[in-house]
Image (cartoon, rainbow, N blue to C red):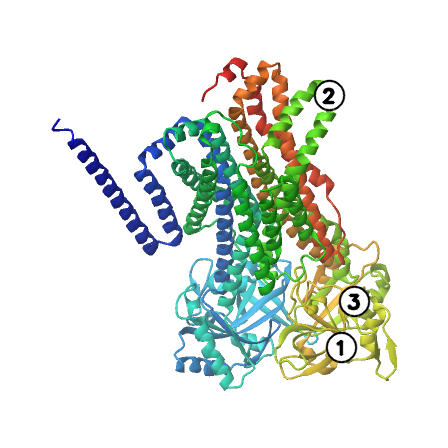
Amino acid sequence: MTDTPAAPRKSFAGSANRKAHAALKVLGLLAIAVIASVSLTPPIAVLVILGLIVAGFASLRPMLARIAVRNLVRRKGRVAIAVLGLLVGTAIISSSLVVGDTLNHIFVQSVYDRFDLVDETVSNGVSGNLLSFNETVVPILREGLVNRSAPFDGLGPALVKDMPVRNPNGSKGNQGTTVMGLDEAQESGLGDLVGLDGRRVRISDLPASSVYVNERAAQQLNATRDDVLTLFYGTTNQTIVYRRIDAIVRDEGKGNWDLRAIVFMDLRDAQASFREPGRVNLIRISNVGGVADGVGHSAEVARAASLVITENVWTLVVSPVKADALDSARRLGRDATELFLVMGAFSVVAGLLLIVNIFVMMAEERKAEMGVSRAIGLQRGDLTTAFLIEGSAFAFAAAALGALAGLVLGAVMIYFFGILIPLQEGIRVAFYFEPASVVLAFTVGAVMTFASVALAAWRISRLNVVRAIRDLPEPEGHHANLFLVAGVALAAVGAAGTIYGFASDYSLGKVAGIPLLALGLAVAASRWIPARWPVTIAGLANLVYQLGPWHFVNLRPDEESVLFVAIGLLLVLGGILIAVFNAAPALKALIVASARRTGRPAARIAMSYPTERPFRTGMTLAMFALILFTVTVISMVQALQGASIERFIQEQSGGYDIVGYTVNYGEIPDFRTILRTNLSQELSFYFRGGEQGVASATVLPAKVRTSGSTQELDYTLWGIDNFLVNANTYGFHEHLPWILDANGTRQDLDTPQRVWQALSLNHSYAVVDRSATGPSQFVGSGGGLRAAPGDHVVVSDGAGREVQLIVLGVLEQALQFTTPIFTDQSVVKGNFNVSRTYTAYFFQLAPGTDTGWMRGELERIFFSYGLRTIDIREEIGRAFDASQQVLTLMQAYLGIGLMVGIAGLGVVTARAVVERRQQIGALRAIGFTREMVLSSFLIEIAFIAALGIVVGMALGVILAYKVYSVFFADFATFVVPWVNLSVIAAIALGATVAATASPAVRASKIPPAEALRYIE
């Protein structure tokens, strides 16, 4: 009797100790979390904190941890299936980041290869063309940089010329070889030329009349040491120079300048040979540091050089070429990452839906088990915690495997990228990734999976003990209050997003705000009326809003990627809501009515399950619809391009088949006479209309500004001859209705031809292309000039000469091959130095004339003048093919997302077999045969897959038509690639049935007695 009071004291002490121990654990975990957040990188810190949260749950509630571990151990096979399904989203993210890393590395490395130690250049350039200047600038600039303590260690002049070079010994030539004159005495700090044997070679060691060539030039010219090259400089007054190859240097360092084929000469030799005594056209500056780290001083050195230039009133410009090129390269890498992430976003969302679906099904399967757990004392929070601990194992395992799988997927994508996408010669494609990207993908994947699991766990824990133990369905309206709260919250978010979007011109708010508001009101209305009607109305309102004639207007171009994902998700959401609440009952009635009498029971059973569980059906449908929507949009873009290629070629070519241009300044003398003399037939045999089929333009690299503005833009002024005026087929977007000609007579401009002829009637006018109207989602920014008919523009050559022109008209198209201003040829020749102009030639071929043969003849006849030719159709086709290949690559990438949908249906079917095992037994007991059970499962699977395919593809086609009608209708033809889409749909449906056939067959073979007494 005396010992009885001791027990409570011991129990109280033990409880106090346990609480103190738990408090110490929590404090320790919090301390670790604080240290991690401060000392680690954000992704790793997030992982540590996430792990600490799970560890805290497990240590504070060890019994719940044991329950979670028991479930994992008992269901190893299902755990493996679930992890495989869950890892796809992480793999998509990982591969997107890795592809971005690789492309960023490729482009950045190509910049280092192009410029080596050179960080800035100083030149008198206009539209990329280098005008020569007095080399006395060089020592003054060097002294000025030294006086300003600029961090540079090399500064050297160069005379750089592009010209035709022929190797008679190797029987090969190249119209655009770069010849570079260097002064060895001023090359300190700018790198070395390295011979094939690895030894340094010096310009100062060159014998008289000798040159070095790099490997690229040697290959193009089929040249070896001691071959004598013929250099053709100039056009109107041509100089021919002969030089012996003294050595071949490697394509590395200075020998790889700008990835060009280069002939290296002594500077004095180059100046004398090309009639440029005492002049250079490029100064190269190397900053303190190596190839990669020297660029960090570019801003400082460029600023100091600009001050020296300004003080001396030179017409020179300093360009931080390496820094600018690196910015462009990294931007390309970011754009590639964004492209793959945007395309993969739908697959990631599908993966998240699969996660929720898997855990909801697990909960349904364990409903009775969880009911018993609640009955013996566990609270809702305990069930949520147990599921969170179990789900965290899925999250970390799937994220880790997904991050590694993303490496493999990224390597495959880069392999095909290197095969399909044409890159500049000299750019090396090699797989590369940053470890930080893999860690980031792992972190994002783990967090997304954990968040999805938490949402599913919260939903799962809200069960009624009695109904769960007896496996009874939840009564109608049991979540009414929850729907009301969720609906009001969603409506508030939508209203706030709408107000903010329109008030601050935030496109995402405009796009998503109203649909979320409608959906929130529909969910709230479900508190009082059946959900079918308000949800259907909300879905229809969403589709009408997204696809209405007022949409896509005034959306900001810088938000295009996010908007594409948002619009796609909202469209699919609207379509799924309509389908789940309406199409399913309609199709159920249709299938049951159309099925043969012997098949009706199987059809009824097949349709009852998905229609009675709209949440799970909608999640599965969405997985399919999201991917098929994106694949369809890409297929539609491909089809639009394919159907519009002929029209695009006609619009871009202006009716011409071949364009030729000289690489040297000046005009080819007696061009037509030389052409007639060297062709075996009359011109009319080869060219449409004879001489009318050959036109020319005098092309001036120029600076352009609108009248009253000081901002100058790089443009090209095209002085076109009468042949080009009369024969081209370019149309106009807008133009002046009339002009006064040179005599003051009014000339009405009622046809495109008369607009062109007006350039000859009054030399005060010019024509610009469509880019001058400003960029849009599908019209590039061009050179940045903004002008309309009647506006005045000022054109200068960078050497003090200028002319003011009036915009006569704007072309129907934005030209891809140039940033042009067209005017009469006499304007260019009469106002500017013709020796600083190029000449372009246009050829309209007669029927039967082979384009490739004619190009070869033209380049042969005019090789010494450096005439290069372009087959317009072939060039546009090459760009078109590259675009199509990128889209095909994207489709293949999205095929992974389709695997998510198929895997999802496979997992759902496998879980459904377990969940419905006793129902299957009951069906077999009342007379269902194995074939009927199998048919019911296959019909159910085919219904879900087909409905998802139809919803996704239909919305994809509708959105594509919307985009076409707003942006492409003026210059494209709308087509639907029915064959392509049918093949995609057949593959998706066939793969789905194949993937789910095995669990369906297993379900049909379950003996009735075994199924009825089945306890997992």
Nearer the observer: mark 1 or 2; the answer is 2
Residue 569 rendering spot, x and y as whole percentages = 60, 47
Pointer 1 and pointer 2: residues touching (CB < 8 Å)?
Answer: no
N-terminal label among 1 and 3: 3
The answer to whether the residues at label 3 and label 2 have Cβ atoms under 8 Å apart is no
**What label sits on residue 596 in the rendered view?**
2
Position of residue 192 in the picture relative to residue 129 (left or right): left
Residue 244 picture location, percent across and down? 56, 66
In the image shown, does 304 or 513 lie closer to the viewer?
Answer: 513
Q: Residue at x 34, y 54 (%)?
A: 37
Helix, strand or loop status at disc 1: loop
**Neighbourhood count class around disc 3 (C-alpha, 10 Å): few under 14, some 14–19, many 20 upward:** many
Residue type for callout 3: Phe
- In this rendering, the answer to whether 298 lies above or below 68 is below
The residue that disc 3 covers is 732
Check disc 1: other Cα within 10 Å, few if <14, some if 14-19, many if 20+.
Answer: some
Looking at marks 1 and 2 on the same chain, the residue that comes earlier in the sequence is marked by: 2
| Residue 675 lies in quadrant | bottom right
C-alpha separation, residue under disc 1 versus residue under disc 3? 14 Å
Q: Which residue is mark 1?
A: 790
User: Residue 49: where, in percent of width, then height?
Assistant: 36, 48
Q: Is residue 971 left or right of residue 626?
A: right
Quarter of the image with the C terminus is top left
Local SS, label 3 = strand
Q: Disc 3 and disc 2: Cα gap in Å?
A: 63 Å
Please state which of the two labelled residues, at mark 3 or mark 2, is closer to the viewer.
2
